[in-house]
Image: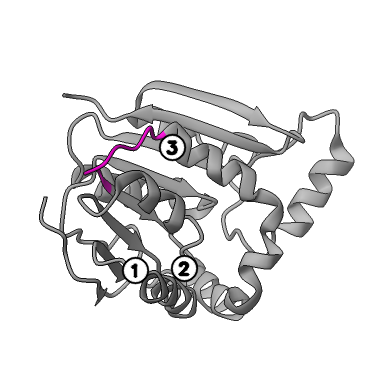
Amino acid sequence: MRTMPPATTNATPSTGTNLERAVRHYDELAPNYDYATRRIDGVRARAIAALQLQPGDVVLDAGCGTGFCFHMIEDAIGPSGRLIGIEPSPAMLARARGRVDDAGWTNVTLLNTSGEAAQMPSAPTAILFSYTHDLIRSRAGLANLFGQSRPATRVAAAGTQLFPRWFFPGNWYLYYSHRGYITNFESFDAPWQILGEHLEGFTVSRQYPGERYLARGRLPGG
């Protein structure tokens, strides 16, 4: 596959109140986001490993944030692969762009857009959802991204879910601590539910200490 020059494309995200509020908040979080979320680095890495990436893969990092996962993805796909990152927060995407520039990667395309509005330059063979709760709860967003993907595209998602119901103090804390990161707490006990409706071979496992999950599967076909 021909390597592509790095690019940043602007697309108008959907203008729902929740998305607008989330973009403003993540713009504020961007300078300290990597440090503030350092405790989830392990499950991020396990989600990437679950994709079983190979040289030449086209990977969509959906809701790529600051591009924290880019190094691990690039190590797996090599210069013959392609990495597409979509992110509605301009400040977060600027951090991701800085990572690309610093590393000198020439096979990365960054899109300032939402999942609902994204128009991808290439059809993914693998998709990562790393702590993108609002996106994986968006039927329109998932339909748009999956509709542009290749048959049998591998999908992995990592994020937060509620502890078992008996541990209500922990769940109270999760609601409180995630109020700035999540605008839609619907199905916080099973945030991966809609993903499971789309994917074959779908599995979910709790990750230590219990409020983190790793979900994986693949799109039909192939």
Q: Bounds of the magenta span? A: 51-58
Which residue, given by chain and number where applicable, does mark 1 sit on?
14
Q: Is residue 173 above or below residue 190?
A: below
Q: Which mark is residue 19?
A: 2
Q: Position of residue 133 (x, y in %)?
A: 53, 50
Spatial separation of the CA atoms under disc 1 and disc 3:
24 Å
> In percent of the image, x 54 and y 26: which residue is there?
204
Looking at this view, is 187 or 199 the one in front?
A: 199
Q: Is residue 58 above or below residue 16?
A: above
User: What is the magenta segment's predominant secondary structure?
Assistant: loop
| Quadrant housing residue 14 | bottom left
Upstream in sequence: badge 3 or badge 2:
2
Q: Position of residue 156 (x, y in %)?
A: 43, 37
Upstream in sequence: badge 1 or badge 3:
1
Q: Is residue 164 above or below residue 107?
A: above
Q: Closer to the camera: disc 3 or disc 2? A: 3
Q: Amino acid at mark 2?
A: Leu
52 with respect to 22 (left or right): left
95 with respect to 85 (left or right): right
Is residue 57 inside the magenta stretch? yes
Q: Amino acid at mark 3?
A: Ala
- Number of on-image labels: 3
Spatial separation of the CA atoms under disc 1 and disc 2:
7 Å
Q: Position of residue 56 (x, y in %)?
A: 21, 44
> In percent of the image, x 43 and y 36: which residue is there?
194
| Quadrant housing residue 151 | top left
The image quadrant where one finds the C terminus is top left
Name the secondary structure under disc 3. Answer: strand
Q: Is residue 16 among what the camera can see?
A: yes
Upstream in sequence: badge 1 or badge 2:
1
Looking at this view, is 61 or 75 the one in front?
A: 75
